[in-house]
């Protein structure tokens, strides 16, 4: 959550020179994005306990199956939302404002940032799995990787003469995509480290 706060703080700093409509559009779009994430976060929250129970019982195959199905389900939900955002992103913005400039910024944000919704769903699911496996450091590492990619690039772009607000969204897409790949690879590593286990023996009657 601290790293997420850092991310939003950096974005607000980057877009401050584009005026109030840009900040308002991003604020509205960001809140809508967070609401969109609720279904896939619910899936991730469900994955954690199931993985934890299966891991505790020595059921490595069930751990893997839970994670894979969780990723497929969250990715499917995010794909549907992505298609909606690609089609009419301005619809949701108009519920909160009728200012044309604000709607334009918010719609552009949602349309572009939705391209990483599937990757974000994978990140959430992997984070739930890490909790279930009893090691949340990989989730922290993948979030740090995202910031280490995002912040240097956007700070560099900010001081270029042709800097535009859309470049911030493009770099965000890149950083979240890399985070999704990193989370998946870190989860596979956790599988190798922790799932060489045998089922617990049955308790004698």
Image (cartoon, rainbow, N blue to C red):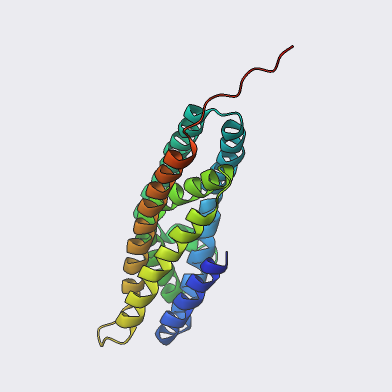
Can you give x and y, in whole percent of width and height, for residue 121 in the image? 45, 48
Can you give x and y, in whole percent of width and height, for residue 94 in the image? 49, 63
- Horizontal side of 152 relative to 28 (left or right) equals left
Name the outermost residue toward the top: 205
Name the outermost residue toward the right: 205
Residue 29 vertical placement versus 48 (above, below): below
Name the outermost residue toward the left: 162
Tell me if I can see residue 46 in this picture.
yes
- Horizontal side of 66 relative to 89 (left or right) equals right
Residue 67 vertical placement versus 178 (above, below): above
Residue closest to the eye, 171 or 55: 55
Q: What's the residue at 45%, 51% (across, down)? A: 123
Tell me if I can see residue 114 in this picture.
no
Q: What's the residue at 47%, 72% (across, down)? A: 25
Can you give x and y, in whole percent of width and height, for residue 84 in the image? 40, 49
- Quarter of the image for the N terminus: give it: bottom right
- Quarter of the image for the C terminus: give it: top right
Q: For residue 155, what is the image quadrant?
A: bottom left
Residue 74 vertical placement versus 151 (above, below): above
Q: What's the residue at 32%, 62% (across, down)? A: 174
Residue 61 vertical placement versus 97 (above, below): above
Can you give x and y, in whole percent of width and height, for residue 83 in the image? 36, 48
- Horizontal side of 163 relative to 190 (left or right) equals left
Q: What's the residue at 46%, 82% (across, down)? A: 13
Number of callouts: 0
Residue closest to the eye, 84 or 57: 57
């Amino acid at each position: 959550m601290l790293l997420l706060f850092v991310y939003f703080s950096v974005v607000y700093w980057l877009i401050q020179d584009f005026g109030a409509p840009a900040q308002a559009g991003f604020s509205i779009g960001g809140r809508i994005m967070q609401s969109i994430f609720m279904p896939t976060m619910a899936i991730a929250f469900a994955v954690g306990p199931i993985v934890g129970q299966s891991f505790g019982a020595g059921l490595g195959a069930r751990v893997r199956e839970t994670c894979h199905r969780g990723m497929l389900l969250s990715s499917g939900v995010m794909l549907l939302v992505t298609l909606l955002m690609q089609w009419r992103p301005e619809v949701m913005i108009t519920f909160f404002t009728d200012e044309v400039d604000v709607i334009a910024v918010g719609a552009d944000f949602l349309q572009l940032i939705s391209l990483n919704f599937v990757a974000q769903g994978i990140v959430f699911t992997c984070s739930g799995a890490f909790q279930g496996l009893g090691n949340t450091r990989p989730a922290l590492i993948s979030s740090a990787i995202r910031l280490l990619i995002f912040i240097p690039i956007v700070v560099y772009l900010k001081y270029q003469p042709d800097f535009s607000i859309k470049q911030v969204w493009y770099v965000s897409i890149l950083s979240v995509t890399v985070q999704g790949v990193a989370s998946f690879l870190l989860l596979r590593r956790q599988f190798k480290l922790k799932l060489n286990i045998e089922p617990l023996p049955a308790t004698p009657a």
